[in-house]
Amino acid sequence: MLQDKIKQYTQEIEQFAPGSAADVEAFRLKFLVSKGIVKSLFEEFKTVSVEEKRVLGKVLNEFKQLAEDRFQEAQVEFQQSSGDLERKEGDLTLPGEGIELGSRHPLSLVRKEIVEIFKKLGFVVSEGPEIEDDWHNFSALNFPPEHPARDMQDTFFIKKQEGNDIALRTHTSSVQVRMMEMGKPPFRAIMPGRVYRNEAISSRAHCFFHQVEGLYVDENVSFADLKQTLFHFVQELYGEGTKVRFRPSYFPFTEPSAEMDISCTICKGTGCNLCKGSGWVEILGCGMVDPNVLENCSIDSKKYSGFAFGMGIERVTNLKYEIKDLRLFSENDTRFLSQFETEII
Ligand code: PHE
């Protein structure tokens, strides 16, 4: 009788306790395939009387559901214990693999720091193009026509054109010119950016590096303002008590010009390898904007004066983190880069 068979198989299914994947598969083959028991009971169902159908229809459907549910349960249960699931979907009970966070490039960190210090003094940030013409990179900055800095050995020329060659800028002083040409004094800006020079790459030189230019033009700006501004900057960046000294120097676009040294950040002035025993390290060039430069930018040099300075970000960074090889900055070696501050944005 159909009813008895259903009862018997229901019992069998309820007692089913698989010990391996093979048991689960045997269950499937016995009950659920097209020649299996469930199907055969449905075949038999077709032959019973209408009264019996009324009663058994529901019972049979429940039986079918039971067989399917039990099979699925057994499948999951078995796969979990055998490690099958692990291979297919990963072990969901393991802790997740964290995503490695990137870190800021040391040059970006230092640039940001420099910018923040000058922002507090009211300097705005300005930028200019890396591909420049001769006028902005040299002529307007008072470089004489035969100045060696214009030479092929220093400058990457892109296009020769009569009186105004196109080149990769060799310094950020070109941005000073662009600023002054476009606006009216007062100007108080810093200009960070990448610059290019045709140099053989070594631990101490690279064909590109980064500078931050500073410019302050107003009425009655003096060398004392320049000294005080840079002194304050150095205290902020390298800590209170860092000494500064100015040595006379020459730049075509500043008069007078100076180079600024700070007391060695490593030995604090007593003499070490970094400062070659002198106790001082050079960090920037500066001076009073040459009146010719102001006039080239249509600024009245009788009314206005200003100071400018320019520093290499690599140099400032090397001093801060004691990095001895410039090439590390552009090699993208994560063993180097991951040593710097990680920022969670
Ligand atoms: N442009 C100079 C350099 O590249 C630095 C500098 C900027 C010097 C401004 C004086 C004033 O070396």
Image (cartoon, rainbow, N blue to C red):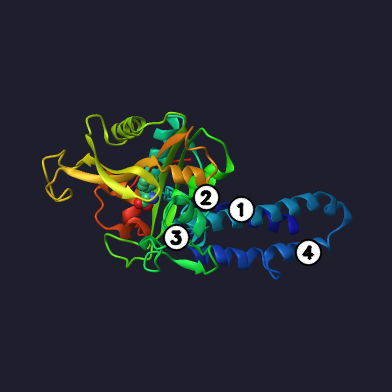
Q: Is mark 2 on a helix, strand or loop?
A: loop
Q: Is residue 332 in view?
A: no
* Disc sitting over residue 44 in the figure: 4
Q: Residues within 10 Å of mark 3 (few under 14, many from 20)?
A: few
Q: Which of marks 1 and 4 is nearer the N terminus?
A: 1
- The amino acid marked with disc number 4 is Glu
Residue that carries the numbered disc 3 in the rendered image: 82
- The amino acid marked with disc number 2 is Gly
Q: Is mark 3 on a helix, strand or loop?
A: helix
Which image quadrant for residue 222?
A: top left
Residue that carries the numbered disc 1 in the rendered image: 11
Cβ of mark 4 under 8 A from ligand 1: no
Residue 204 to residue 315: above or below: below
Q: Which of marks 3 and 2 is nearer the N terminus?
A: 3
The mark lying in front, picked from 3 and 4, is 3
Residue at position x 43%, y 36% in the image:
306
In depth, the one of 326 and 126 nearer the eye is 126
Residue that carries the numbered disc 2 in the rendered image: 128
The mark lying in front, picked from 4 and 2, is 2
Cβ of mark 1 under 8 A from ligand 1: no
In depth, the one of 144 and 227 nearer the eye is 144
- The amino acid marked with disc number 1 is Gln
Q: Is residue 263 in view?
A: yes
Q: Position of residue 16 (x, y in %)?
A: 55, 56
